[in-house]
Amino acid sequence: MMSREVKVGNTIIGGGNPIAVQTMCDTHTADVEATLAQCREMAQAGVDIIRVTVPGMPEVQAVRRIKEELLRDGITIPLVADIHFSSETALAVVPYVDKIRINPGNFHPDHDKARERFKELIEKCKVFGKPIRIGLNHGSLGRFITEKYGNTPQAMAMAAIEWLDMCVENAFPSVVLSLKASNTIVMTEAYRILAEKMAEKGYDFPFHLGVTEAGNGDSGRIKSCVGISTLLSEGIGDTLRVSLTEDPVNEISIGKYLASRYSGELKSTMKRIRITGREVEAFYDSPDKERLLLDFSCDFGKRLLDKEIDSVRLHSPFGENYDSYLEDELMQACRRRFYKPEYIACPGCGRTMYDLHKALETVKKRTSHLKGMVIAVMGCVVNGPGEMADADWGYVGEGGGKVTIYRKSKPLLRHIPEEEAIDRLLELIEKSEA
């Protein structure tokens, strides 16, 4: 089913329009100059939509200034406000941005009150002609839904349907949906279930795709490509964001690759393939390692994820060691075989109160021997504890140079100085395995 068009500033999502590539600032939004500088870099890199976090009322006026300054610079890229928990902030920022991203279930602990607040937001967005992205993430669905369906892909889809029903009932058509998870299996299954349920209802709202908390480096790129490309290849997806725990400008080129590939503008550099039962050998002639990584992930991610094949042997110009490394990374991204720890790491945003990039690299270095363990490194306590739903252990920044360490969803140590936190994490892991 062709999705409807949703206008976000001067960009149109859905309706067969080009796949829009998004990214998000990791600056503190109240630091207007730093946020403007990052937006300008993003614009130069060719992004289609920029998102900024708006955690409270002080940031509302900062966003207003940012939008005004960008327009003075001739930068007309749509600006999206990212809201968590505060319906008052969502209502206040509507006039100053091109779209609002919210999780309505987080507007209030009482589900009926959350519905009331969401209806208020719908009405204000109708007045100002602004669209909404309903963005639901695995691990932060709210008690009302998880008590019914558990913390599952089905729960994510059913939560989305409830909010979509409200939009339809209130004659609000300008909606985009996302159901993100760090686990590629959960992510793809949630979108597939939602697409099926929407088709049953005759809903044609466009989808925003992403693997949240994908991490950094090759692993983050491969995991993102596996989840996003699987859905794009099935005709699901109208806009996307590649979420990396790096400079957010780095996300844009990967997103543009995916958009170009699944619009038919770009072809894989794979030259031939040999299939023996459920084993595959693939031969590539890629110009560089990054292009090989992206092509290989998209060519075989879906097949491995859906268990159509059991393994793929890579042959490239870059040698057997590099080929073997990419094979291992792809198998892990598809949750078929783990050869190292699995890291869940948010990309960071204006709510992050410590050096997330440095923390992730340090945690990876110190825990590299823990094969198969899932470790989360999260930027703040707003989403961290919920959205690291798959993690065995969590390292979550509190701000003020302090860290909380979690075992599953339970905080074991709070207010640990950053310089001690990794040692304490390793002590807890060793004690648990003794």
Image (tube, rainbow, N blue to C red):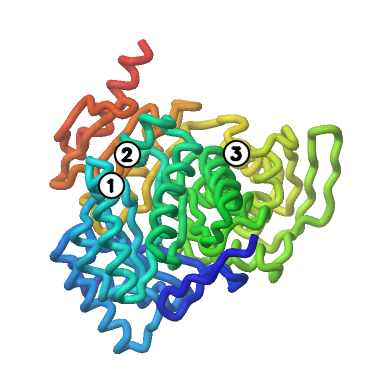
Question: Three-letter amino acid code at disc 2?
Answer: Gly
Q: Is residue 2 left or right of residue 429?
A: right
Question: Three-letter amino acid code at disc 1?
Answer: Asn
- How far is the residue under mark 3 from the one under mark 2? 27 Å
Q: Which residue is mark 2?
A: 142
- How far is the residue under mark 3 from the one under mark 1? 30 Å
Q: Which residue is mark 1?
A: 106
Give the percent coordinates (x, y) of residue 285: 76, 58
Q: Quadrant of residue 383?
A: top left
Name the N-terminal-most of marks 3 and 1. Answer: 1
Q: Which mark is residue 334?
A: 3
Question: Three-letter amino acid code at disc 3?
Answer: Cys
Give the percent coordinates (x, y) of residue 64: 22, 76
- The residue shown at (50%, 67%) is 21
- The residue shown at (22%, 34%) is 404
Q: Secondary structure at mark 3?
A: loop
Determine whether label 1 and label 2 are within 8 Å by CB. yes
Give the percent coordinates (x, y) of residue 434: 36, 10
Give the percent coordinates (x, y) of residue 137: 40, 45
